[in-house]
Image (cartoon, rainbow, N blue to C red):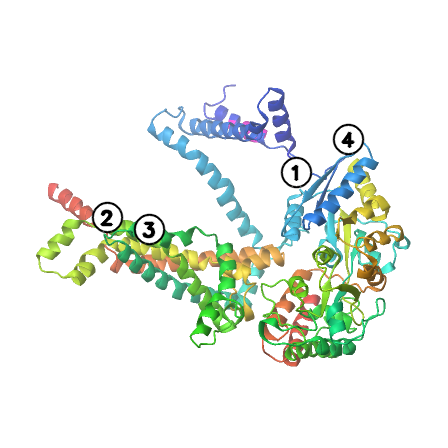
Amino acid sequence: MKLPNRVIPAMAAVLLAAGCATGSPPAATTGGDSDNAGISFSFWGTNSEAASLKAIAAAFEKANPGTKVTTNWIQADYEQKLQTSIAAGTQSTVMEISNTSLAGFAPSFAEQQVDPGRFVQPNISDSLKYDGKYYAMPFTAKPKVMAINVDAFKAAGLPLPSATTPLTLDEYQEIAAKLSHGEGKSRVYGASNLWFKGWLTAAGGGFYNADASACTFGDTQGLKTAQYVVDMQKNRYAPTSLDIQGQDQAQWFAAGRLGTFSDFGPWTIADFAKISKPNWTLVPVPGKGFPMEVGGLAISKRASGKQLETAKKFIEFASSNPDAQNQLIQGNTALGVPIIAESTGTLEKVLPAERNLAAFTTAMRTGLVSPSVPREAQISGDADKGITSYTPLGSGKDDVAKILPGLNDKCTAALKQ
Amino acid sequence: MNPTIGWIRSLAESWGVPAVLVPLVPFLLLLIVLYAVIGLAAYGAKRKWPRADKTIAFWLFISPWLIGFALFTVGPMLSSVYVSLTAWDLITPPRFVGLANYSEAFQDPRVAQALKVTLLYAVISVPLQTVLAFLVALLLNADLPGMRFFRTVWYLPSLVSGVAQMVLFLWVFNPQYGLANDVLGKVGIEGPGWFNDASWALPTVILMSLWTVGGAMVIYLAGLKDVPVNLQEAAALDGAGAVRIFWHVTLPQLSPIILFNALTGIIGALQIFTQGFIANGGPKDSLLFFVYYLYDNAFQNFRMGYASALAWILFVVILALTAVTARGSAFAVYYETELSGRRRSSRRLRRK
């Protein structure tokens, strides 16, 4: 049989084109039953935070000869890049994830077995549960404490607050009033700029209710706290967001312009370590403290075989081995507070005892954790934009009592969508 | 990595191809296969091999761009049409929702706000930029010593990236510590909140956009240098003054350039993003530009389907406005080639 002249080249073209196809989906870096036990590990953070995580990976390689952990430090837009890599099937085997973002990513993470008893408080592992299942292993906690300007307290004739027992919000307001003085660009504020979400938790409220079925920042407690913050700003005990725009409040503290600095995370230690004058120390954040972020390590759902085994070993190592936990502290800064009892003391020794870094351990033991909701960025982002646009909690001028309930209702409606 | 590509790469490595060139090997092989497919298909269609004439050379030379265009522009565009008909958060598989995203967009008050802010910006900033760039070009066209220095100075801001510009102007217009309010304060005027005030944020961005008219100015300047001197001399001999020469000779000669700058200005203005992104949408959504809202939905809210639908809506808006502008310009834009074209056609008619 003779094939027509046109058919042969056409068939050749089809065959050539078919040769380009593989017939199988592209293999992700997490892929299958590879003999190679190497894993990849994505994380975000500053130079020092990345140094901590790279050091943990190196310690794991040392403890497990022949195992390779390829680190992937994503310096900006971490969640966007993580999400796009998941969509493309090129995500790392292990991914750092915060408790606040867990819910949105849970469908792409493998379920994990976590023993809550290993950590210094049960909140830490609970925060990485979604729908009753663990989707990440905790490896660090990031509680907030408050720095106080010891010299300013002495100058105002005020006794120093307790190193372990938090002030009440009313006591704090009184102290801030007494510490505030001066005018213009040299005014000294008793408090640093007040972060509404943080102070809401400190006052006993919350952005969401416990089961994250409704937003609660516009309820009675929310309005009371918002008014508290607005009054502190109106009385000029705390700078507004416009006052601090483009400014570094740590520098204000160093220059003696702040009596207290309330948004002090473990990563702030390095900035304050440089400050010798004014003299300073750490105390708990007033009331119930600010919400505590928990850092977790998740394994890609696509991981299997030896890579899955290695990934499990790696996150176990990072969360419960003192060699790894001690790496959270690099020089005089920290990615977070170690979460196992053997290592919590490591952070406390970074600076002299009078700086009271033990306040972090206290804050971690009592720290409250916000629930995680899917579409967190959208829901809380929209609410935040509204709050900061319209009310004096940001750059607006409208009454918080008029604006917050409406935003709260929209937020709850978005949660229920 | 795709196993086939991995295999080709390892083969190339085993053949001693330098490591820096290894990633290129699969791509080049793909191109060769593609050309072979096209060649065989062409043979199949015409029953003769394409001749190595100028046409073939043209297609070969243009093909790298064509392939890139098909892979990286047309492909994603077609893909986004499909994505716009789905609900997709990148984590879970896309779910087909028909026209629901388009329907939601037409009812979304923030889409209306984004369109309002973007159109207002385009309508005000493009004419202002056009007039300012043109006036500056006229000034810099003067034959005076040191003019090259001033041309460079005017063009320089166009080289600064959008983010750097925005950060700079956030400082200049900082209500507490900024240069603008400091200067205003020295003459007894209390400056506004600029980016922090919902009613001032957009005018501030428009004001800021005038800083970068250098790019358009250079094009006008080139156009002014190209205006035939004999036309201006002829007009002068006929008794026309400077204003009449400008109005009846210079301006018509530059009208295609003005149209070009206006069209690219409109398209650019409708795609403004950086200013809204850095200002986080501005107070009360006063800087909620359409592309920023699109980005917000895609990469903050992870609503790829909705964001794709917004992208297509913007595409239609830009297409419509460009078409209206281009069509409307027919009455005001003078093309020298039109005249010669008419001459040619009249000659052809005479021959017939």
* Quadrant position of residue B66: top left
Kindly give the residue lying farthest to the left in the view shown: B238
Q: Residues within 10 Å of mark 1 (few under 14, many from 20)?
A: few
Q: Chain of mark 1?
A: A
Q: Nearer the viewer, mark 2 or mark 1?
A: 2
Kindly report the distance in space between the C-alpha atoms of the residues bearing marks 3 and 1: 58 Å
As for residue A367 lying within the magenta part, the answer is no
Kindly report the distance in space between the C-alpha atoms of the residues bearing marks 4 and 1: 20 Å
Q: Secondary structure at mark 2?
A: helix
- Sooner in the amino-acid sequence: mark 4 or mark 1: 1
Query: Magenta residues, as a range?
Result: A13-19
Q: Residues within 10 Å of mark 3 (few under 14, many from 20)?
A: few
Amino acid type at circle 3 is Phe
Residue B155 in the figure: left or right of residue B238: right
Q: Chain of mark 3?
A: B
Q: Nearer the viewer, mark 2 or mark 4?
A: 2
Q: Circle 4 sits on which residue?
A: A35
Amino acid type at circle 4 is Asp
B147 or B223: nearer the viewer: B147
Kindly report the distance in space between the C-alpha atoms of the residues bearing marks 2 and 4: 69 Å
Q: Main secondary structure of the magenta part?
A: helix
Q: Are marks 2 and 4 in contact (CB under 8 Å)?
A: no
Q: Position of residue B325 (x, y in %)?
A: 34, 59
Q: Circle 2 sits on which residue?
A: B226
Kindly report the distance in space between the C-alpha atoms of the residues bearing marks 2 and 1: 57 Å
Q: Circle 3 sits on which residue?
A: B149
